[in-house]
């Protein structure tokens, strides 16, 4: 998957790559994506160039995505309901559209998780 400047569009397009993963790979992706989102919260809170009010706005949006990402993991494992990749990533893009400053952070979290999962053999 190629990531470009248009983060929201690319974030939405993530679903095409993730749909192609086997179930174990998708679960691993969401575990890693969630971990990376916590790192992105640290990036925001540790940036002295961002005003506190803006930090709060960015952290709130990242946290909303993190909440959904961690909720998706048990939904997938327990098969409690279908949560399509297209629906999930459409929701993520919606949050990014609320504050484009979080786009590169979300994109970075997805990119790191995709890099690890793509480099690992299936079922590892």
Image (cartoon, helix red, strand yellow):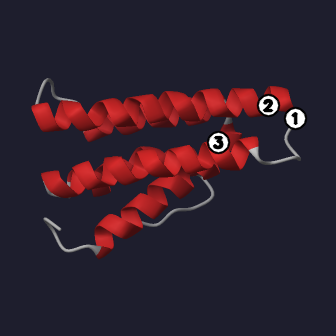
Q: Which residue is mark 2?
A: 54
**Contact (Cβ within 8 Å) of mark 2 with mark 1:** yes
Percent coordinates x, y for residue 63 in the rendering: 54, 31
Name the residue tied to disc 3.
102
Query: Which quadrant of the structure image shows residue 74?
Result: top left
- Judge from the rendering whether residue 33 lies leftward or rightward of residue 20; answer left or right: right
**32 and 21: which is toward the camera:** 32
Q: Nearer the viewer, residue 19 or 113?
A: 113
Along the line of sight, the residue nearer the viewer: 76 or 89: 76
Earlier sequence position, callout 3 versus callout 2: 2
Q: CA distance from mark 2 to mark 1?
A: 5 Å
Q: Residue at x 31, y 65 (%)?
A: 117
User: Which residue position holds label 1?
Assistant: 51
The C terminus - image quarter: bottom left
Tell me the crowding category of disc 2: few under 14, some 14 to 19, or many 20 or more residues within 10 angstroms, Cα based.
some
Q: Nearer the viewer, mark 3 or mark 1?
A: 1
Q: Is residue 104 visible?
A: yes
Give the number of marks.
3
Q: CA distance from mark 3 to mark 2?
A: 11 Å
Answer above or below: position of 71 versus 27: above
Taking 93 as reference, is 123 left or right? left
Binning the other alpha carbons within 10 Å of mark 1 as few (below 14), some (14 to 19) or many (20 upward) gives: few
Label 3 and label 1: CA atoms lie apart by 14 Å
Left or right, 77 with reference to 42: left
56 on left or right of 19 = right
Residue 102, horizontal then vertical, whole percent = 64, 42
SS class, disc 3: helix
Q: Closer to the N terminus: mark 3 or mark 1? A: 1
């Amino acid at each position: 998957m190629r990531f470009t400047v248009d983060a929201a569009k690319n974030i939405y397009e993530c679903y095409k790559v993730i749909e192609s993963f086997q179930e174990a790979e998708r679960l691993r992706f969401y575990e890693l994506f969630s971990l990376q989102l916590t790192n992105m919260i640290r990036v925001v809170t540790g940036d002295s160039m961002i005003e506190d009010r803006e930090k709060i706005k960015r952290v709130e949006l990242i946290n909303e995505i993190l909440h959904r990402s961690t909720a998706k993991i048990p939904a997938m494992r327990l098969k409690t309901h279908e949560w399509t990749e297209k629906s999930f990533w459409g929701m993520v893009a919606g949050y990014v559209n609320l504050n484009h400053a979080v786009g590169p952070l979300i994109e970075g979290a997805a990119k790191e998780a995709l890099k690890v999962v793509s480099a690992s053999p299936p079922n590892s």
